[in-house]
Image (tube, rainbow, N blue to C red):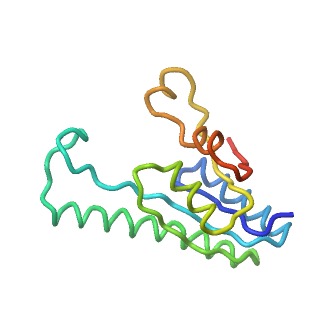
Amino acid sequence: MYKRILIATDGSPLSETAVQTGLSLAGLTGASVIALKVVPRYPRSYFDGGLPVDAAEVKRIEKQWSDAAQELVNKVKLRGSNEGVSVKAVVAKSDLVAEAVIAAAKKHNCDLIVMASHGRKGLKRLLLGSETQHVLTHSHIPVLVLR
């Protein structure tokens, strides 16, 4: 059925549901897993809403974010190995989360994307956006959304 499943996670309790469901599905189908965490780049201009920060501090902050993301996907990899599922841990750096998820799924030849949706509605959805909705509307790969 599925040969390679991409599980997108942000470390939130809701995305934990996606991780567990994706690993269980992979175990049932014999699929391998790509565990993905997308890390944003640090805002670098006055127009990004932040105070200017020197380049060394930006580098340190981005490394901290990247290290935390790597730790998160490594935990998914460990859980997968405990469940007999082969997991590749991937960290992508991009300000465009949905595009990064879709690109990673294509790059790794995934045939399913598993991710969570916070289910925001109304003004919150308008202000905060929906990466899941963007993946759903732009991906040519099937998407399993968990709430």
Residue 5 shown left or right of residue 14 in the figure: right
Question: Residue 5 in the image: x percent, y percent?
Answer: 71, 63
Q: Nearer the viewer, residue 137 or 52?
A: 137
Image quadrant holding the C terminus, namely top right
Residue 130 falls in image quadrant = top right
Which residue: 21% across, 38% down? 47
Question: Residue 68 in the image: x percent, y percent?
Answer: 41, 66
Give the residue at the far top of this rendering.
122
Residue 64 shown left or right of residue 85 in the figure: left
Which residue: 78% across, 70% down? 31
Question: Residue 37 in the image: x percent, y percent?
Answer: 51, 60
Residue 39 falls in image quadrant = bottom left
Q: Nearer the viewer, residue 137 or 64?
A: 137
Question: Residue 128 in the image: x percent, y percent?
Answer: 45, 33
Residue 54 falls in image quadrant = bottom left
Q: Is residue 127 above or below residue 65?
A: above
Q: Is residue 101 above or below residue 120?
A: below
Q: Is residue 111 above or below residue 122?
A: below
Which residue: 25% across, 41% down? 48
Q: How many marks?
A: 0
Residue 16 shown left or right of residue 123 in the figure: right
Which residue: 63% across, 62% down? 106
Image quadrant holding the N terminus, namely bottom right
